[in-house]
Image: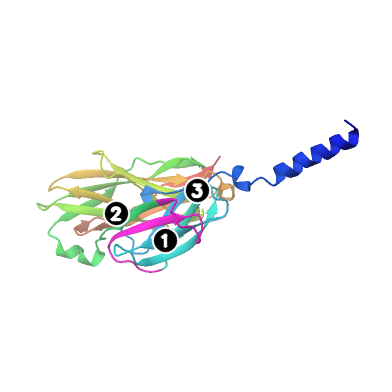
């Protein structure tokens, strides 16, 4: 076979393979919804998840009656997506669907979003229960490594009356020099092994609400631990500080104690 024929044959093979469907090489797009973002007391929740899509996914929220109450093209960054509601939703359940694009008919993932009731501060005087609130001096601060999870508050609550009361969450305020987007999620638990939650970090004007569900029986004491997970790639935050004060406790009981509870100083480092 002559050189010219070999060259022609090779070129034909290259052209044949170049016209194979792109789908034969591309991986199927997948997406999921974070369970931690599906239960919240916020009327304008932020839903988040993961995907291997390169640019965006299409998020649709429907009421129990099937009516679309929210839709958005959510941008993808480092394999993660977020969709923050721009309208106020009523308490109840909603269906969240994630699609590859607006034109997609089949959802990549579908989950139920539950908006729970949040106790209002103004109702605190209507309960016969009373809670003593103090900080537990177990934190000493220091250097906080990017990508790690650090305790930011230990809150001691004691039910000092004969009525059972509930705790719905805590509000924290960042008084350090670091930007609030250094924190990706908050986690809670208590010394009884309960009140475990992991929620996305959604700050508004320097404050973030961290929901949980707990009940204190008459005379019961609990110590709640609040932890913050730090972004591993926020190098511009190095040397800056996190100081998260507990500014309020979401409960219907009367609070006895001095707020805010001063946070520990953490300096961000490698």
Q: Please tell me whether mark 1 sits on a helix, a strand or a loop.
A: strand
- 88 in the magenta segment: yes
Picture quadrant where residue 120 is located: bottom left
What's the CA distance linking mark 1 and mark 2? 28 Å
Q: Main secondary structure of the magenta part?
A: loop
Q: For label 1, count other residues whose C-alpha is less than 10 Å away and answer few (under 14), some (14-19) or many (20+).
A: some
Instruction: Tell me, yes or no, whether the two marked residues, 3 and 2, touch with CB atoms within 8 Å.
Output: no
Residue 268 image position (x, y, % from top left): 52, 45
Q: Is residue 227 visible?
A: yes
The magenta region covers 87-109
Comparing marks 3 and 2, which lies closer to the viewer?
3
* Element carrying mark 2: strand
Quadrant assignment for the C terminus: top right
User: Residue 1 sits in which quadrant?
Assistant: top right
* Residue denoted by label 2: 169
Label 1 vs 2, first from the N-terminus: 1
Which mark, residue 51?
Answer: 3
Q: Residue furthest left?
A: 162
Q: Earlier in the sequence, mark 3 or mark 1?
A: 3
Kindly identify which residue carries mark 1: 60
Mark 2 residue crowding within 10 angstroms, few (<14) / some (14–19) / many (20+): many
Q: Real-space Cα distance between discs 3 and 2? A: 30 Å
Left or right, 94 with reference to 178: left
Q: Is residue 38 visible?
A: no
* Cα–Cα span, label 3 and label 1: 16 Å
Q: On the picture, is 188 further left or further right than 60? A: left
Callout 3: helix, strand or loop?
A: strand
């Amino acid at each position: 076979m002559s050189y010219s024929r070999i060259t022609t044959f090779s070129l034909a093979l290259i052209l044949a393979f170049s016209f194979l469907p792109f789908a034969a090489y591309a991986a199927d797009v997948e997406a999921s919804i974070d369970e931690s973002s599906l239960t919240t007391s916020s009327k304008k929740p932020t839903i988040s998840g993961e995907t291997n899509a390169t640019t965006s996914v299409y998020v649709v929220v429907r009421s129990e009656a099937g009516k679309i109450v929210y839709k958005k093209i959510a941008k993808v960054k480092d394999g993660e997506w977020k969709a923050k509601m721009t309208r106020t939703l009523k308490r109840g359940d909603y269906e969240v669907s994630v699609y590859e694009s607006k034109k997609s008919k089949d959802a990549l993932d579908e989950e139920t979003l539950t908006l729970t009731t949040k106790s209002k501060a103004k109702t605190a005087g209507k309960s016969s229960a009373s809670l003593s609130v103090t900080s537990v001096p177990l934190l000493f601060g220091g250097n906080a490594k990017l990508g790690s999870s650090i305790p930011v508050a230990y809150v001691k609550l004691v039910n000092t009356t004969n009525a059972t009361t509930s705790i719905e969450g805590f509000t924290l305020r960042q008084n350090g020099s670091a930007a609030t987007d250094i924190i990706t999620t908050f986690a809670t638990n208590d010394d009884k092994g309960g009140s475990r939650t992991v929620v996305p970090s959604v700050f508004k004007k320097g404050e973030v609400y961290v929901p949980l569900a707990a009940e204190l029986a008459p005379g019961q004491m609990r110590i709640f631990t609040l932890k913050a997970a730090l972004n591993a790639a926020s190098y511009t935050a190095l040397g800056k500080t996190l100081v998260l004060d507990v500014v309020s406790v979401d409960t219907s009981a009367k609070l006895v104690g001095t707020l805010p509870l001063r946070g520990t100083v953490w300096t961000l480092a490698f």
